[in-house]
Amino acid sequence: MREPFKLFFSIFQERSKLKEYRNEGRRIFGTMCNNVPEEVIHALNAVPFRMFGNYGNTNLANSRIPSWTCNYARNVMEAGLRGDFDFLDGVVSATTDDTKIHLFSAYRFYMKPEFSYLVQFPYVRDEISERFFSKELERFAKHLSSFLSAEFDLERLSDSIKIYNKYRLLCSEFEKLRADEKPKIRADEFMALMLSSLSMLKEDFTSMAENLPEMLREHDGFSDYRLRIHLSGTDFYSLTLLRLIEESGMAVVSDDLCTSAGYFTGYVEGDGFDALAERYSGCTACVMTSSNTELSVEERLRFIRKKLRENEADAIVLLKDRGCEVCGHQCPWIVREIDAPVLVLDLDFPLSVEQYRTRMEAFVEAHGGG
Amino acid sequence: MENSWNPLGYKNLYRELFKKHLDRQNELLKKNRPVGWFFSFHPSELIYIFDVVPAFPEQYSAYCAARGSSVDLIDTSISSGYGHFLCDYFKTTIGMIEAPEKATPPLMPKPDFIISSRALCVAHHEMAEVFSRYYGIPKYTVNYPYWTTDSLKNPDELTKEAEWAEEVYVEYTIERLRGLVDFLSKIAGEVDEDRFMEVFRKSEKTSELLIKILNLMMSKPTPGSQREISDLVFIAFFVLGSDYALEFCENAYEIIKERVKRKEGVSEEKYRLLTFGIVPWHSLKIYQYCESMGANFPVNLYVNASVHKADSSNPYLSMVRRSMHFTNSSYEMLDGVVKTAKKAEIDGALLLENTGCRITSMIIRPLAERLNEDLGVQSLILEAPQCDPRVMPMERAKTQIDAFLESLS
Ligand code: SF4
Ligand code: SF4
């Protein structure tokens, strides 16, 4: 990994920014889902931080929640039980899948955070549901502001929305750079950026990273690949596997991961809770919400097709965490319906990376050019 | 040491109930009435109000498990690329769709529409998406809230009547339920208001009887077997609102009432156990095995979760109330359950972890902890997917149960 990205990754690993915020007396709230409307937390001058654990073995967690649940959930639980999140003032999750709902419940039960909130998603986009969702976000804001003994200010919300939109715009620039004919960013570097952005305030991330695109544009880019791929999956964040993908001759040019494009795609158009509700219920990359006339899997397929087209990806690598319910239900549809070769990697954590190498190389051999 | 096993004798009542249910299905199918697929905790009354033909993936999968075809169906689903650790009901149903020749007849009729109601699990919503896509049929979603301490206060464990429920959530759910009525009207014809009320009145009476039966089950000695009580979920989930459900409950209530009056138990009672989790349909004998050893089950929390007090004077609120069960509430809300366990004077708990089901499996350890902390009661947790006998062979389960009962004595 190159230098600037190393720095970003260390912010994620060492939580250095969070420590700074803590020292400044800011309150920090852990989030368990990319669909938590962080602007609400941000508008209250608090810091949203996406919770991750990084344990190969999740023995403590396995004694509280089933060992067959997804890697993300077990790792959050493990990290919580080991005290890694003791610095948090509270946790927020969303009803986007059973794992996230019950992880939230289990976390609350065992860790007893001072504050917790579960954002209720409507799953449907119609007038009634959007109206409800807007009220739900307002309710969340009320609960959080009462916990923080602070007034919720709509003007501040508007500022936070701007900051988040600016962040999203910057991410889309990085996206373009990795989709270049000679990609300017490696997959692990891109993920390092994402993870760091989830561990610091967006305004700090943006000011640290805003010159990066220009610097990267001057770089020649990488041409040591034979296959351009779109990466599909959910709450995935293993840099080791990303490196292996690229070492096998693939370049990751786009994705729909909850930890990456599924998180930053989509702007908030306008102000206030209504606009926020529209954005968060309209994210199609992984959330179960869909319009009245379409299924969420169809929206996801459309999202993937668009990414393939825009970024000229030749194939898909699908990261199928064996415990992920979203992958479990949607994977066959992606394989069947997307008109591109798909390599499905059944991920069992802790990863024994080498077992995937042969399959990746064979995939590149079969579908990669020159 | 085995002692005699003396169930209530609901078997014939169930036979009669299923027969009437199937007769209704066949009659309506002949009339070309629309077919809908539904999931547990949906407002079953609407099936009878709109005269539609219901099919229930959960119930059908349980049937396949009891008849031994579910393993092949599950394997079919996994080889089609669906995840291993998903709900057994989903995998079994996918198997039926993809390899009907492997499924136990009669198969579920093809749906014309599907109702995705999340009052228990997002899995219902996830599977409704998949089924709806297979058949290219419309889907309507009712997303009930997942209740937390800040949105629901003191729901009764059986009636689900609560001291307070967040208005924003209740109102939204009611709006979605009204939308469901509109959706069904378009498919099955206009709603008849008299019929609407009549069905809800029946539902109310039936629900009261179900609650009474479950209360009587807590008598000493435990009057009935879980072999028969665990099937009450079929009534509470799927046919509440029908004539035959009411008839069943009237008879079932009389039987258990008499039994309690006579102070007669299902077996010579040595231990009183609480149970939770979906019964492994392939190994239904597990309860009978325990009861034959004198370990009876006055409380089955899964059955308790399935019932609610229907209210014909406020049908929409009553539909929302269905969702106020502890399996759809955050884990600090186990107080009601602990209260029930205390009232039933239990000595231990047999908890079933249904692999692939995040609902039952993730709440089990907090539940075991609460029972231990509050009542000093020990639990045996068995990993038992409800449709796949390979994970929990009956012989292994028996050994674990024997050791557990030994530890209680
Ligand atoms: S989307 Fe998948 S990986 Fe993410 S929390 Fe849900 S089950 Fe786990
Ligand atoms: S077994 Fe679990 S996941 Fe499956 S339908 Fe029932 S509650 Fe939902």
Image: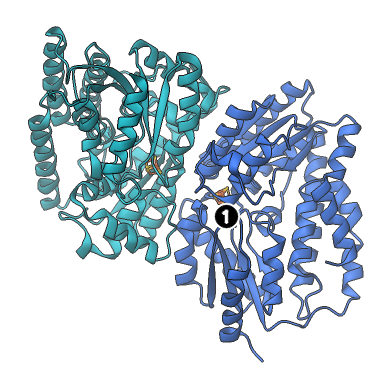
Q: Residue at x 12, y 43 (%)?
A: B22
Label 1 lies in what chain? A
**Image quadrant occupied by the C terminus of chain A:** bottom right
* Image coordinates for residue A360, horizontal then vertical, percent: 60, 76
Q: Residue A72 placed where, x, y %?
A: 61, 49
Residue B55 in view, yes or no: no
* Chain ID, blue in image: A
Q: Residue at position x 87%, y 44% from top?
A: A16
Q: Nearer the viewer, residue B382 or A333?
A: B382
Mark 1: amino acid: Cys
Q: Is residue B265 above or below residue A297?
A: above
Residue situated in front as seen by the camera: B271 or B305: B271
Q: Which residue is mark 1?
A: A286
Q: Secondary structure at mark 1?
A: loop
> According to the rendering, which colour does chain B have?
cyan
| Beta carbon at label 1 within 8 Å of ligand 1 | yes
